[in-house]
Structures are given as C-alpha cells and as structure tokens.
C-alpha cells in the first residue's frame, strides 16, 4: 500500500490537470463543464479517493506482471485521456475505467 497512495494521488492530480486544461471546474453535479471530484486529493471523500486507488492498483498489477513497462507509457501530451496505456503481452488498453478490450 505504500506505493499505491502516492500513485493514486498523482493520478488524481493528472486527471484534474487534464480536466482543467479543457475548462472543467468544480461543481456539485457532473456536467460537461463541472465535476464534483475537481478538488484537491485531501478534500475528496473516501469513495472518490478509492476510484483513483483502484486505477493505481490495476496499473501496479499490470506492471508487476510484466504487461506494462515504462517505455510503453506515452507522454501525457500525446494522449487523449490522462490514463490510457497499451497492455504488454495482451490485447486492450488500461484506461480510467480499468482494462478494456481493443
């Protein structure tokens, strides 16, 4: 768990940066321009933090199994989603919703 928490926090920060870049701001409802998770990590409730922890756990698991390597991860500036990496040795990608087929 010692690696999971800082990775989850960094994923949230990257997601917020991406959302901010495209004009999304905090709002109590999820709309095209607002989102209730547009808050600093320490202001998110537990279930919201758990979403990022889950993504971090999936990424760490894929890396530990050798299906994801650092050289496979494109720079954020070259992605359309802040979290979208090709799987190594399998089909599909890892994205914000977990592992998806190709």
Image (tube, grey):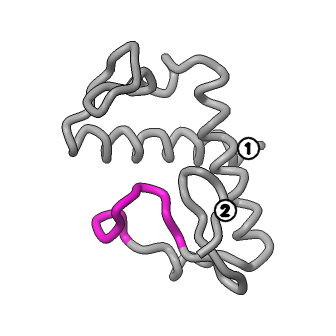
Q: Which of marks 1 and 2 precedes in the sequence?
A: 1
What is the x, y in percent for residue 8? 59, 43
Residue linked to disc 1: 2
From what the image shows, is residue 31 above or below residue 98? above
Res 54 → quadrant: top right
**In what element is the residue under mark 2?**
strand
- Compared across the picture, whether 100 is left or right of 25 comes to right
Q: Is residue 11 above or below residue 66?
A: above
Residue 3, position in %: x, y? 69, 49
Pointer 2 with pointer 1, Cβ within 8 A: no
Towards the viewer: 22 or 72? 22
Q: Residue at x 39, y 57 (%)?
A: 81
The residue range painted magenta reads 75-85
Mark 1, Cα crowd under 10 Å, few <14 / some 14-19 / many 20+, is few
- Percent across and percent down for residue 83 are 48, 57
- Identity of the residue drawn at 27% across and 26% down: 25
In percent of the image, x 49 and y 45: which residue is there?
Answer: 10
Side of 82 relative to 33 (left or right): right
Judge by depth and name the residue closer to the eye, 39 or 87: 87
Label 2 – label 1 distance at C-alpha = 23 Å
> Which disc number belongs to residue 26?
none
Q: Badge 2 local density, few (<14 within 10 Å), some, or many (20+)?
A: some
Q: Which residue is mark 2?
A: 99
**Residue 64 location, x and y as percent?**
77, 69
- Most extreme residue toward the bottom is 89
User: Would you say 13 lies left or right of 51 here?
Assistant: left
56 shown above or below 69: above
Mark 1, secondary structure of its residue: loop
- Number of numbered tags placed on the structure image: 2
């Amino acid at each position: 768990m010692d690696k999971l928490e800082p990775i989850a926090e960094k994923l949230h920060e990257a997601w917020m940066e991406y959302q901010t870049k495209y004009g999304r701001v905090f709002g109590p409802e999820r709309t095209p321009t607002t989102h209730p998770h547009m808050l600093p990590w320490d202001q998110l409730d537990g279930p919201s933090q758990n979403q990022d922890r889950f993504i971090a756990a999936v990424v760490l698991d894929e890396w530990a199994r050798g299906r994801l390597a650092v050289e496979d991860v494109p720079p954020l500036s070259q992605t359309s989603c802040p979290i979208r990496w090709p799987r190594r040795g399998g089909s599909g990608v890892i994205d914000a919703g977990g592992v998806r087929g190709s």
